[in-house]
Amino acid sequence: MTTWDPRRTIAAKRERQTLPPDEVERFVLAYAAGEIGDGPAAAFLMASLLNGLDAGETLAMTRAMIASGDTVRFGDVGRPTVDKHSTGGVADGVTLVFAPLAAALGLAVAKLSGRGLGHTGGTLDKLESIPGLRTDLEPDRIERQVQEVGCAVAAQSSRLVPADGALYALRDATATVPSVPLIAASVMSKKLAVASDLILLDVKAGSGAFMKEPARARDLAQACLALARGAGRPCGVAITDMSQPLGEAIGNALDVIEAVEILRGARRGLLRDLSIWFAARALEAARGAPFDEASARAAKALDDGSASERFARMIEAQGGDPRVTEDPGSILPRATVVAPLLADRAGVLGAVDAEAIGMASSSLGAGRARKGERIDPAVGIVFRPKIGDRIDVREPLGEIHARSREAAEEASARTLAALTVGEAPVEPPPLIHDWFPPEGGR
Ligand code: URA
C-alpha cells in the first residue's frame, strides 16, 4: 500500500488538475485532525484560489467540513427553523437583528456564524463583545436554546464543522478568502450542518464585499445554490449591495449598539431595511405570508419591542448580560479615545471604498492581522453618510473609536481617502440587486 502524501494533492492543484473527491476530503479531514500543518494547508488554499475548484471538488470540500464534526438536528421545535448567512461585508449587522426578529415573528433561528474575515466583520466577534456571552455552544445546547428562546447564534467548535473553523482562520491569515468555491464550501458547510427548514443567503456585491462585481456574486450565489440543491435543502439567495458600509458601525461593540437601537425601533436606515427584508422573506417562504404583510409585521416587531425582548433572552441564555438591550453604552467596552471624523471636502458622496474603511477599522484592532489574534471589541469607526448625500467641509461624518490619538488620526485619514466626492448628483445604489427565491417557494 502506498502512503498518501499531501504534497501530491497540492502539486496536482498547482498544476490545475481536477482532484478526485476522496482526495479533497482526505486533505480537509487530515488538516482538521492536525495531521497536516498550516504550511501545506495554506499552499493548498492558495492553489485552490488561483486555479479554482470545480463543482465536484467544492462539494467534496463541503462534505468533508461537515463530516469533521457533529450535526445539529431538531426535534419538534413547533415552528419552522430558518438560517440566514451573509458572505461578508462592512457594517453588516443583519444577523444580530435578524435572529431575534425572526424569533419574535414565530420562527426559530439556529445559526452558526463566523468571525471577522479579512476586512469584513464577524457576528461572533460582535456578539462576544457583550460581557459573559459565549458562542461555543454544544449541539444539544443549541437545540435546547432554540426550543426555549427561539434563536441561538453559535460558533463552529471542536464538535461543529471544526474543519471550517480551522480553514477559515487560516484563510484570514493567508489572503485566501476571495474565492467562489472556498467561500461557498465555508458558508454551506455551516448551513448544511444544521438541519433548518430554510436557508437564506445574503451574497454581498460591491467595494466592501469579497465579490466586487455583481456577476461574480452571481457565480457565488449559484455555487451555494448548487450545494443546497445537492443536499435537498430549500435555499433562497439575495444579492445585496455592499458598495458602501450597510449600517453605520464598523467594529464590534459599536455594531452591537447599532443593532440594539434597531431592535428597539429607535433607528432607521439600510441596516434596518435589509433586516426587515430578510425577515419578511423568511415569513413568506416558511409561513406563506404575503411579502408586504410580512414586512409590516417585521417592522412592527422592531417598533413594539418584541424583537429586542428576544435579543435579551438570547443574550442571557448564552451567558451574556441582557441589560445590554437597555443601556448598551454602560455595559459594553468603550474605547479610550473617541475622535470626530470631519469631512475634508465638500460635495456629493459618489462612491465609498468600503473595503478600505473595513481595513482601517481592522488596523485599529477590530480585526485580526494574524491567525488567532485577540481583537479589541471597543474600537472601530462610525461612518454615517450614504452615497448620494451632500457633505460639507468639517462636517462630522462619524467618529473614530481608538486606543490612541495617533491610531485615531491614521484611521481618520484612511477613511477620508476611501471617499469619492464630486459635484454631480448621484443616485443611491439599489439595496437588493437580485433575488433567487427558494425552489418550491415564491
Ligand atoms: N462567510 C463564511 O462563513 N465563510 C467565508 O468564507 C466567507 C464568509
Image (tube, rainbow, N blue to C red):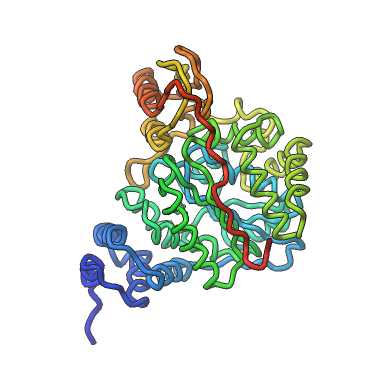
Residue 369's x, y, as percent? 33, 41
Residue 308 appears anywhere in the view = yes
Between 275 and 315, the one nearer to me in the picture: 275
Between 134 and 338, the one nearer to me in the picture: 338
Residue 217's x, y, as percent? 45, 53
Q: How many marks?
A: 0
Residue 393's x, y, as percent? 45, 12
Between 121 and 158, the one nearer to me in the picture: 121
Quadrant where the image shows the C terminus: bottom right
Residue 339 appears anywhere in the view = no
Between 89 and 326, the one nearer to me in the picture: 89
Quadrant where the image shows the N terminus: bottom left
List the single residue furthest toward the front: 424
* Quadrant position of residue 363: top left
398 vs 366: above or below: above
30 vs 436: above or below: below
List the single residue furthest toward the top: 394
> Residue at 37% across / 41% down in the picture?
368
* Quadrant position of residue 284: bottom right
